[in-house]
Image (cartoon, rainbow, N blue to C red):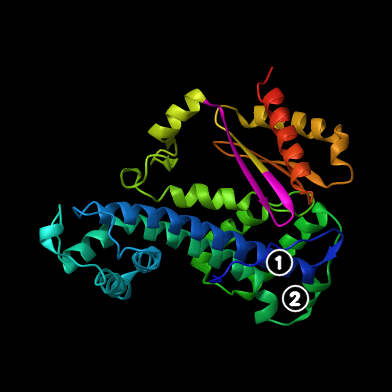
Amino acid sequence: MDSKPRKRNQIKLPTIGAELFTYLKDVNDHESFTASMRLKDLLSERVKIEINSWFKAAPLPELDRTLLRKITNSLLSAGLTGQKRTRDALSEIRFDERNMTQPKGLVEATEFLRNWARDYRSAKGFLDYQYKCVNSFLRVQKTTNDDSVRMLLKADIDGMADFKKWQQNLDSYWNKKGLVKENLRTAYQNMFEIFMGTFDDQLQNGMYHKYLDQNWQRYVDPTSDSEDFDHEFETEDGSHASAERTVKSAVNPFEVDLRIEGGEIFYHVVCNALTEFQASELRFKIALSISQNQDFGDSRFSVALLPGDLPIILIRTDSPKDETSIRNIVNFLERVLDESKRPK
């Protein structure tokens, strides 16, 4: 996975397979990196609170942003190498028992934090594996060069039907070349299918980061996270349980997430209390309201539905350049949701 975020790529229909390969790889790079950063930010905040709780005089002056990030990165690193990195990072803190509420030496502190952060390493492992699986399909044009690859590169993509056909051809070629061990192929294919399923009919993607976030959060132990961070976990019987989410859902049937990025506005509505059918009806009502609003003019927009236990409606539109117009669009979307979210 890239160590630096890449600028969000854009694509317009019609396009060709070569451009599609590049675009899909950029989406995978960008969303995987930003999800990883959100995981690191959460762990970093929890590490800061935990370490400061060991000392009488807190916050520790030496626990600055640089050292905190160093400790966080080390905790997400697996094995003996990760353990050594954690110990080296913690060695910059003075473990003087006279100033500690919970006396710990360097070795004990290292072992404690390594065990404490185990679930975060699992979450990071999920993100890395998901990225690896998707990237396995998107790099075939760089690892092989034959007539099938050239056909994929030259293919005309005019709409969703061509996109799906291109995906099937890529999947078939990937299987035929045997680039991954046979016993791992099903898992790779499932993850690639999920990734490809998050694109709308204009091949724009604003849902994949939601999928990544919802899944890495399930790895994290709720007893070791801040109280204001919402978690959902899958139990052995496939049901979903979260005491905090249960309370929130009883009060607010919708959760809204707004992002303005890469010249676009992303407006996500998590439907806590709707079935997929009800969410689909809501999606239609929202799309109809937007299409009848003249303020959108020639701006592209899409209203997509990501089905699941908690359906997600993604409203995506071009972002104006001036702040006033952006505010007007956001206010309009809020009014549309407020008027539409109560199914009749």
Quarter of the figure with the N terminus: bottom right
Q: Which residues are magenta?
A: 252-266
Q: Which residue is mark 1?
A: 170
- Residue 204: % across, % down: 74, 53
Task: Identify the image quadrant of residue 169.
Answer: bottom right
Q: Amino acid at mark 2?
A: Val
110 versus 177 height, above or below: above
Residue depicted at 85% across the width and 37% down the height = 295
| Image coords of residue 304 (percent x, y) | 71, 42
Q: Residues within 10 Å of mark 1 (few under 14, many from 20)?
A: some
Give the amino acid type for the residue marked by disc 1 in the picture.
Leu
Q: Is residue 55 left or right of residue 229?
A: left
Mark 2 Cα-neighbour bin, 10 Å: few <14, some 14–19, many ≥20: many
The answer to whether residue 1 is above or below residue 220 is: below
Point 46% across, 52% down: residue: 216
Q: Is residue 12 visible?
A: yes
Chief SS of the magenta region: strand
Q: Secondary structure at mark 2?
A: helix
Residue highlighted by disc 2: 149
